[in-house]
Amino acid sequence: MTSTNDPGAVADPASGRASHIHRLRGLAVTGFVATLAAIVATTVAAALAQAVGVEFEIPDGGEKIPLPGFAVVTGFFSLVGIVIAAALLRWSARPAERFLWAAVSLTAISFIPPLISGADTATSAALLGLHLVPAAVMIPAPVRSLRSRTADRARVERILAEDPYHTTPGVEVTSVREWSPVVGPDQPGRP
């Protein structure tokens, strides 16, 4: 086991998996809460659009999009977004930036179907707005979660690079885990 002078980071070969599971669990909870919020916001926005007269009728087949359909599709694609965020957390050095890029790109691509559907102007405009509602909820939440779960890694890398022990030939840090001191000025809950 190797360590640094920083009480917030300790290198330990057995800790990588537990740390990853902890970060993944936090992202999953954030994603689940954001998914529920996106479902509610989108369904309420669709209900308000229907209340002001938007039909949500697609000319190809003439069927109306039912209100529960908005909730189901929003929930499904929000969960897909969380899976993408989890994959980026696992395999990307910059998961927050990569997720933001992917989510904004996928949101832009999602504008294509409402524009080419042939629906009336009110329906097309409402559908475009209903793509923005869950995006406004779902994109910031995982980005914040991914940033807070990876921001300390740069600090740890800087500390490891500055510590003469860790730059000695033959010394290798195999993983880094979080820990909290039991005593001292950096104890949680102390100023």
Image (cartoon, rainbow, N blue to C red):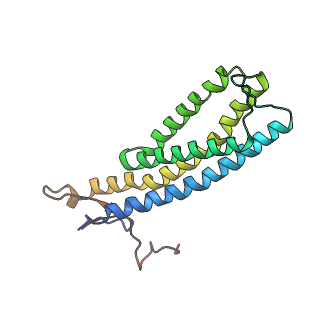
Quadrant showing the N terminus = bottom left
Q: Residue furthest bottom?
A: 183
Q: Is residue 136 above or below residue 63?
A: below
The answer to which of 176 and 168 lies nearer the viewer is 176
Q: Is residue 83 above or below residue 119?
A: below
Is residue 68 shown left or right of residue 26?
right
Is residue 189 shown left or right of residue 181?
right
Residue, x 45% and y 49% (percent of image)?
A: 86
Q: Is residue 153 above or below residue 74?
A: below
Q: Percent from the top left, x then y, of residue 148? A: 49, 54
Residue, x 54% and y 59% (percent of image)?
A: 29
Q: Residue furthest right?
A: 52
The answer to which of 63 and 138 lies nearer the viewer is 63
Q: Percent from the top left, x then y, of residue 134? A: 65, 42
Label count reads 0
Residue, x 28% and y 56% (percent of image)?
A: 160
Q: Residue 33 falls in which quadrant of the image? A: bottom right
Q: Residue furthest left?
A: 170
Q: Percent from the top left, x then y, of residue 83? A: 47, 47
Is residue 129 shown left or right of residue 82?
right
Q: Is residue 113 above or below residue 95?
A: above
Q: Residue furthest front?
A: 61
Q: Percent from the top left, x then y, of residue 109? A: 56, 28
Is residue 115 shown left or right of residue 142?
right
